[in-house]
Amino acid sequence: MASELDQLKKLTTVVVDTGDIDAIGKYKPQDATTNPSLIFAAAKEPKYAHLIDDAIAYGKANGKDKVDSELMALIIDKLSVNFGVEILKHVPGYVSTEVDARLSFSKSRTKERARRIIKLYEEASIPKERILIKIASTWEGIEAAKELKEEGIQCNLTLLFSFAQAVACGAAGVKLISPFVGRIRDWYMKHDGVEGYTGPEDPGVKSVTEIYNYYKKFGYETIVMGASFRNKEEILELAGCDRLTIAPNWLKALEESKSTVNIKLSQKSAASCTDIEEEIILDEETFRWEMNQDAMATEKLAEGIRNFSKDLVSLENMLQKKLDDS
């Protein structure tokens, strides 16, 4: 019998969530996603030193007129693109590259950085059609993605924890969203004082299911890609979702098991869903109110931005030492 991973690939597009290029080559996913935390972890490995050296050399050659913070931002973007270029040698689809999380509340600066990331990929002969720009699902981030789409730049809206965020992303016509299954579960476990949840009762699974059904029922083309899993069961409960981005440890667990994988989400089941009968329209005021009323989403979005920013600072400090020594 086929492994759970092979069965899952027949129901869902599997994406690998890592900056480790060797792991991507091993599991042969359709797409790959990265974030500042994954890039920082990978950048500490000696086998990727040449990517860092190239980014620093690029920054020194092209950032002579920039202040220190702008030079470091350029080096970070170039390093992220260097990893993306290597990743694209192993995947036939997209790679997602993240904009600096500290720009999550600036539509204009997010757009500027997104354009530069695309330019860096184009300099490496990678067309923008293979890139998804990762942006936090703030109101400003969603609006930036909407306007970038008009320029032919597609985005992956990350750090998504609420139905309101998903509704706004769908209305904006963004290419893809990444609801964070495990982090939603983490919050509710602490809030409810429980050790875990079974199958479809997992709050993260329920959130993605609701979003998927809403999108399919009302004809939204935005891709739903579940992310941030805490166990194999969460992944299997979302079999049939458009995409699932999965860390190497869970890919390994799926590869080693041969239990039967059943489809859980489908266009047909979404069409018959009665939980939501009418399409929802959100303006900025309503979006902010809905986020205010959702303690979990508000806390996890803020926490996610803080943590990505923290890892960016750690990466900057590491790169600054190398820059000083070069």
Image (cartoon, grey):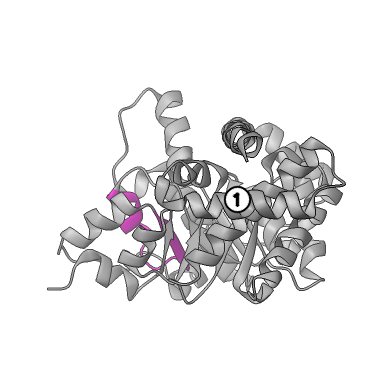
| Quadrant housing residue 306 | top right
Residue sitting at the far front = 326
Residue 19 at x, y percent in the picture: 46, 53
For the question of whether residue 236 can be seen, the reply is yes
Q: Residue at x 66, y 55 (%)?
A: 78
Specify whether residue 239 is painted magenta: yes
Residue at position x 41%, y 66% in the image:
265
| Within-10-Å neighbours for mark 1: few <14, some 14–19, many 20+ | many
The quadrant where residue 58 appears: bottom right
Considering the numbered disc 1 on the image, is that residue within a helix, a strand or a loop? strand
Q: Residue at x 60, y 50 (%)?
A: 158
188 or 49: nearer the viewer: 49
Q: Residue at x 41, y 59 (%)?
A: 21
The amino acid marked with disc number 1 is Thr
Quarter of the image that includes the N terminus: bottom left
The residue where tag 1 is placed is 158
Residue 186 higher or lower than 6, as above or below = above
* Residue 227 x %, y %: 46, 52
Classify residue 310 as left or right of residue 24. right
Q: Quick one: 195 or 325, which is closer to the camera? A: 325
Residue 153 position, x and y percent, is 73, 68
Q: Which residues are magenta?
A: 232-246
Q: Position of residue 273 (x, y in %)?
A: 49, 64
Which of these two is toward me, 296 or 34?
34
Quadrant including the C terminus: top right
Side of 275 relative to 170 (left or right) = left
